[in-house]
Amino acid sequence: MMLPNGWKKVKLGDILTAVDYGTAAKSDAIGKYPVLRMGNLENGYLVWDDLVYSSSEDEYAKYELEKGDILFNRTNSRDKVGKTSIYRGERPSIFAGYLIRLKVNNECDPYYVNYCMNSKRFAEFCKSVRTDAVGQSNINAQVLQTYDFSLPPLEEQKKIAATLSVWDSAIEKMEKLIDAKENELNIVLRQNLLEKGIALKWKEIPLTEILKSVTPPSKIHQDSYLNSGKYPIVDQSKDLIAGWTNDESSVLKINRPLIIFGDHTCALKIMEVPFAQGADGIKILSAKDDYDPVYIYYAIKANPVIPEGYKRHFSALMLKNVFCPSFEEQKKYAAYFKSFDDELSLLKEQLDNYKKQKQGLMQKLLTGQWRVK
């Protein structure tokens, strides 16, 4: 594709004035300056939680971040290596050794470059040049600087970055709304299914008397996951839905909702449609006939406390008790709380659409197919 007039193709190394590796010094749980690590880079922004610190003035003088510095994650797992975020001057900070700091020259808007390094094209570049070892992948600074991208005049770079930042704001607002709704649901669950259960002296029953394991016909290897298909595949991914399949022989047909517990993620999900099982480490559970499975799912979520001395895994979950009213009341509570979750699902679907639309817009704007006036 021919570039618009005034645009040019550049390599990342052509527009950098500095490329620096971060500090290898040991960090502390408390201190004066946050030491940003790979976990603090997310979707082009910095996440200011799970921080470690340094109080060394020598370290700060050497690794001090300045507004507009771009941080690149050079070492991580295969799917996360290459994460890139920009420092916006949020608070005085330094950066750790698994990160590379990039400073751009005065022909470039760092926010525009940051968007280029959060594009699908850049993700494909990282996948093609990374070196893989046991448990982690690496992209060094020399290889990173070979990435080429389209560079418009500086004023147009700024306009493109400003346009994309509007989408970032919409995504951030939606994420905060979802967090607020999830917190509201957790509070209402606790009030209705735990505190009310105690106050009204509902029957308290161990989960071992309510739930039983279900075995799927077979498990699907990760190499066979599809991006879309007829049946969802459940495994250890964050939301437990990791892919799709059309292989009907592997699908668990169900006539009542099933509860999925991710043994390592400690995630719970209620499944009401036929599905297949992927990787190991999940448990598929059905409720006995005189218990409503959707109610039991919410009753578990209402009291997430794990008994003292136990790790957060499946055996600890099964040590828990839940409060159970009559079967008819269970169904009423289940329907009420499911309406909360249905609203959350719609919000999450809208968030996913925002992210897809932003990526599509990035593809058009960063290549000059669409222009910003």
Image (spheres, grey):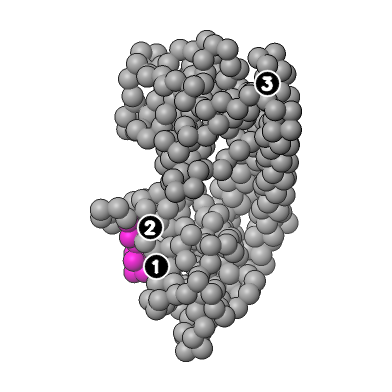
| Picture quadrant where residue 225 is located | top left
Residue that lies at the very extreme toward the left in this rendered image? 134
Indicate whether residue 143 is drawn in magenta: yes
Dot 2 lies on which element?
strand
| Picture quadrant where residue 153 is located | bottom right
Kindly identify which residue carries mark 1: 98
Q: Residue at x 68, y 57 (%)?
A: 165
Q: Is residue 5 above or below residue 341?
A: below
Dot 3 lies on which element?
loop
Q: Is residue 113 left or right of residue 372?
A: left
Mark 3 or mark 1, which has the lower sequence index?
A: 1
The amino acid on which the numbered mark 2 sits, given as a three-letter code, is Asn
Q: Position of residue 99 (x, y in %)?
A: 43, 68
Query: Is there any visible trace of residue 239 in the rendered image?
Result: yes
Q: Alpha carbon of mark 3 to alpha carbon of mark 1: how far? A: 53 Å
Mark 2 or mark 3, which has the lower sequence index?
A: 2
Q: Is disc 1 in contact with disc 2, using a CB cutoff of under 8 Å?
A: yes
Q: Alpha carbon of mark 1 to alpha carbon of mark 2: how far? A: 8 Å
Q: Alpha carbon of mark 2 to alpha carbon of mark 3: how far? A: 48 Å
Query: Badge 1, how many Cα within 10 Å: few under 14, some, many 20+?
Result: many
Kindly identify which residue carries mark 2: 76
Kindly identify which residue carries mark 3: 325
The amino acid on which the numbered mark 1 sits, given as a three-letter code, is Tyr
Indicate whether residue 27 is drawn in magenta: no
* Range drawn in magenta: 137-146
The foreground one among 279 and 6 is: 279
The amino acid on which the numbered mark 3 sits, given as a three-letter code, is Pro
Residue that lies at the very extreme toward the front in this rendered image? 201
Q: Residue at x 51, y 88 (%)?
A: 57
Q: Position of residue 202 (x, y in %)?
A: 68, 25
